Image (tube, rainbow, N blue to C red):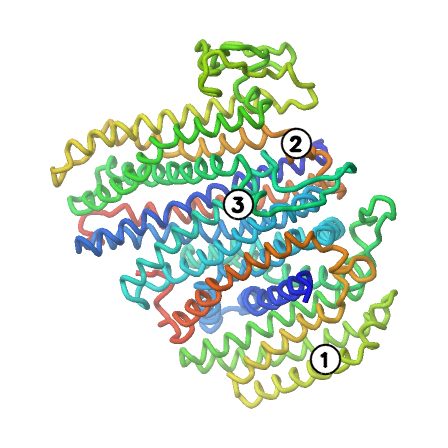
Amino acid sequence: MSPELVLAGIMWVALVGYALTGGADFGGGVWDLLAGRGARAERLRKLVEQAIAPIWEANHVWLILVIVLLFACFPSGFSAITTVLHIPLTAMLIGIVLRGCAFVFRHYGIQSDAASDRWSRTFAISSAVTPLFLGMSLGAVASGRFAFDPETGRPVTDFVSEWAAPFPLAVGGLVLALFSYLAAVYLILEARAQDDDELVDMLRTRALVSGVVVAGFAALGLVTAWQAPGPMFARLVDAPWSIGLQVVIGLTATAALAALWTRRYAAARGLVMAQVTLIVGGFGVGQFPWLIPESITFADAAAPDAVLWAVLGALGAGAVLLVPAFWWLYRVFKASPAAPAATRDGE
Amino acid sequence: MMDDLLAARSQMAMSLGFHIVFACVGMAMPLLMVIAEALHLRTGKAQYLELARRWSKGTAVLFAVGAVSGTVLSFELGLLWPTFMEYAGPIVGMPFSLEGFAFFLEAIFLGVYLYGWDRVSPRLHLAAGAGVAVCGVLSAVFVVTANAWMNTPAGFTTNAAGEVVDVRPFEAMMNPAAPTQVVHMVLAAFVAVGFAVAAIHAWVLLRGKADAAAAAFHRKALTIAMSVGAVTALLQPISGDLSAKMVAEYQPVKLAAMEGHFETERGAALRIGGWPDEETRETSWSIEVPYLLSVLAFADPHAEVVGLNAYPEEDWPPVAVTHIAFQIMVGCGMALMGVGLVWGVLTWRRRREADWSPPRWLLWAIVACGPLGFVAVEAGWTVTEVGRQPWVVHGIMRTEDAVTPMPGLQVPFLVFTVLYVFLSVIVVVLLKRFVFSSFELATGEEAPR
């Protein structure tokens, strides 16, 4: 097993980890934004805030891990991606900063009044920005439309057309819908733990709607992939396992919606998490062995073996410490949910 | 209109300058909180527990902002300097990975510490706090070794065409500058945070609105914060000296700029203050102490110190900026060391007096020192980063060759500056409300036991 394949795999695992944790953070922000007015809306906002707070900082680190693995182990790929996709990555970053502002503002916040509500709303818009541009960036990479100067090896780009195209836009919508769906399902369980049946029902409706929207964007993604120039669609349908994967995703998605409909919420959560894992993970598997399709494979971009083994060693040593620590964190906070008053004042 | 390279450098400088404040807090506040909590467990005095709780509230806000600004930096490394990252990424990737892990662990421990007061046992809670402190420092250690590599590149071989052919990641991490840079930065964080926190509590004491119980609370806080700040402020000049000697050996042109030293000479004088003029190649209006530069740089009063004139001008860093930032840093450091020493001597002499409070003039001095630690941190980073120019990797890659080809970089620079100003305002407002008002313990109201 060559080290670059292991590292590529770890990178995709980290991306999935980010989707399941940080993604839900942004999804929660979307529900905060769309909560509306009134007592129920305030309870929803409070629920979002409580669910996220203890694990919030840890979520970011998945994304940082992806970036570090890229620049340490696949430097030419990193360089090409950050050059060509400068604009959507910057937009994604702005969303992350604003979401951070929103979180800090809300969580440690100033007492609620009209002015701070408006600011809150402004920041909450950021929650939609990052998933959208993350999806567009992934879609742009998958599209296989990067061009390189044969002499210098540097990317040749207008910095726009790679990501402002139908397929990347569809993927952007898909990721936004997916994160919102995931967050809604997580929040149902948090609300149920607080015996807030009204919120549970409210969230169930929202989850069902966003689940359908996800399906819509997935279909749109397939259509735009078919329309897109280049061999991407052919790659998607030619590999036999690829069709199998699409089928499994479809079945999982249907099962998740069914579980929601029949109010089997714990099962729904597991199924939606599986759906997210299959979609995000499937992306990576789908374009293997390409890091940047049609241009740079993982093997092409790989750093010298000494580096790859050193990073793998560091990851291994870190995981030995990190995995138990993460498990402990979740056990401390998710095994028995917080009493509602516990977080805002902290006394 | 700012050109793209300057916009990129400015954006990076602003992002780093912003982040470092929060990184220092993340490194040093956990130590203060752990000391307070440990004292509570040992003495049973409730005020110590109260102190740990209140300190942790302010820390939580600042830590969240630090996490965000750190994420921004990891993106900006690629967005602004893709050519640098393509070259350096594999060589210093490992310390960055380790830094990521240390930060991840720190965030987990912090989650337990901030939100788990009532969910884990007191001993486990204290252990979580210690975990935050250790991981915070480790995270800084790793990332600083990567920066040190940019000053003293090591651990790789290039062929005749200048391509990297062999990478030795551990050697790269343990580059010559790493030990001195790491120690200097870690100490600096404790100095800055120790004095800043002490200044806040000194301010409350000076305002005189606190009743006896509240005053006792703030005195305890002041003692803990000043202990950390004063001890590290006294150690810092030693670290600074070692750092300067390292720069003298490996980056003589940087040392020359720091010292405003144009002419190569033996028995070189130290220039305190003064304005270096790159046109006339002179540093005017400085106080010159004979032989001292040679002594400090090489431990030999007759050692030769190379001047800027020995290098082509295109290899000079911006001399005035580097020199003046250096003077500011050392000046602040001296002030902090002085106040720390005075406080230490007075407090030690009166240690047996239960209700002794430092005299008002000393409290004012501490308040005045509050921002100086952070001023020194920013000035110091200016010295090392600007002083390394025109190189991004000393002697190997120039900054201008490392920047992204993406045009219009003034736009993201402007956008992020506005965002960070926004974020800063929010943080200041929240801290004022959260920290200051909760510390303004009026008589009879919320008095700690």
CB-based contact (under 8 Å), mark 1 and mark 3: no
Q: Position of residue A209 (x, y in %)?
A: 63, 79
Q: Position of residue B119 (x, y in %)?
A: 32, 68
Q: CA distance from mark 1 to mark 3?
A: 40 Å
Marked residue chain, label 1: A
Question: Based on the displayed image, in which of its 4 quarters is residue A34 positioned?
Answer: bottom right
Q: Secondary structure at mark 3?
A: helix
- Labels 1, 3: one chain: no
Q: Which residue is mark 2?
A: B391
> Label 2: how many residues lie within 10 Å, few (<14), some (14-19) or many (20+)?
many
Q: Earlier in the sequence, mark 2 or mark 3?
A: 3
Query: Which residue occupies 54% across, 31% down?
Result: B384
Question: Based on the displayed image, in which of its 4 quarters is residue B306 positioned?
Answer: top right
Q: Which residue is mark 3?
A: B143
- Labels 2, 3: one chain: yes
The kind of residue on which mark 2 rests is Trp
Question: Mark number for residue A245?
Answer: 1
CB-based contact (under 8 Å), mark 2 and mark 3: no
* Mark 1 or mark 3, whichever is nearer to me: 3
Total marks shown come to 3
> Label 3: how many residues lie within 10 Å, few (<14), some (14-19) or many (20+)?
many
Q: Position of residue B220 (x, y in %)?
A: 22, 44
* Mark 1 or mark 2, whichever is nearer to me: 2
The image quadrant where one finds the C terminus of chain B is bottom left
Q: Position of residue A7 (x, y in %)?
A: 64, 62
Marked residue chain, label 2: B
The kind of residue on which mark 1 rests is Leu
